[in-house]
Image (tube, rainbow, N blue to C red):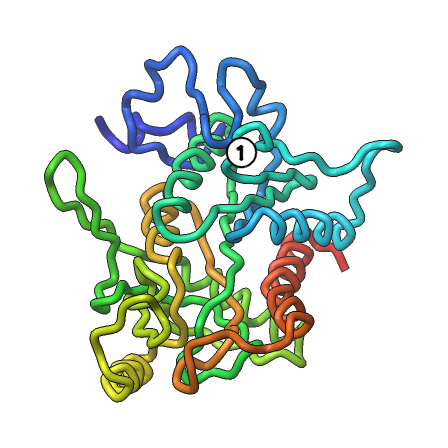
Amino acid sequence: MTENQNRLNESECDVILRNPHISSMTEDVLYHLSLSSGSHDLQQMFGDVKFVCMGGTPKRMEGFANFIQKELNIKLPTGTVLDDISKRSYRYSMYKIGPVLSISHGMGIPSLSIMLHEVIKLMYHAKCKDVIFIRLGTCGGIGLPGGTLVVTESVVDGLLRPYLEMHVLGKTIKRPAVLDKELAGELVAVGKEKLPDYNIVMGTTMCTYDFYEGQGRLDGAFCDYKEEDKLMHLEVLCKEGIKNIEMESLAFAAMCSYAKIKGAVVCVTLLNRLHGDQVSVPKSKLEEWQHRPQELAAAFIKKRLNIR
């Protein structure tokens, strides 16, 4: 099946589904989002979506939903509040605020990939055009102090390979993890203009499958290496231009690229990994730092929507 056969009419949607089986299904159940193409009018509900912003925890993305509502000055009908569209799934949270979707993706590649499969299909069924996906997260910095905003230019795995490796039907599949560099540059430019007090950098992100050993930490349940081994490895990463380490960007980049969706990753560093492993800053400072990616996303969205 050709690429054109795998997509809706160009005038209707520009999100690619590389799955010929979807078109022959009488109903597509987006199980983990508590939505369905049969029981919901997905085009009517989501057809105006232009920005899909996602982050790890339900609480954080609920906070972003309320924040972006105020930033865009969107008024809700009297007596109503923002509703978690996916609350009956007990998996993810999802809020719609005008042209913005705010969704939690859980922790790590498996959780994020499940959500992305269904959100990409949601955009397809809703016939969305020119949609942009932005992951808002936290990370460990490499040679960067806590509170630094890192806009990802390129992504590698723990072996510095720029692709997502999957096992499908007993075979290994490699999908390039590619992000839109023009979009990343625009985010940095917006940040430096609108958030001049924040340290904002662009560079390569390492995505791992584990928080402890996979990231060279010394404080997990298992550790078969010495501190000097860890520091030597982190120094190598620093020389290779790695700015930060997290656990979702590889799948995010690979899946957005495969679906022809422009994607960007914005993370805030919670510590400099060259100086330690544990996040020990006060809770108030941590919450302020975690809000910074949301501020950058809001500034970018307002610029795109010509809202001052």
- In this image, 64 relative to 124: left or right? right
Q: Residues within 10 Å of mark 1 (few under 14, many from 20)?
A: few
Which residue type does callout 1 highlight? Tyr
Rendered position, 288 above or below 51: below
Residue 218, percent from left and from top: 33, 76
Residue drawn where x is 53% and y is 33% of the image: 90
Rendered position, 10 above or below 58: above
SS assignment at label 1: loop
Residue drawn where x is 50% and y is 65% of the image: 138
Residue nearest the observer in this picture, 179 or 117: 117
Q: Quadrant of residue 45?
A: top right
* Farthest top residue in view: 26
Rendered position, 188 above or below 127: below
- In this image, 260 relative to 237: left or right? right
Rendered position, 7 above or below 204: above
Residue drawn where x is 49% and y is 28% of the image: 12
* Farthest right residue in view: 78
Quadrant location of the N terminus? top left
Residue 253, percent from left and from top: 36, 54
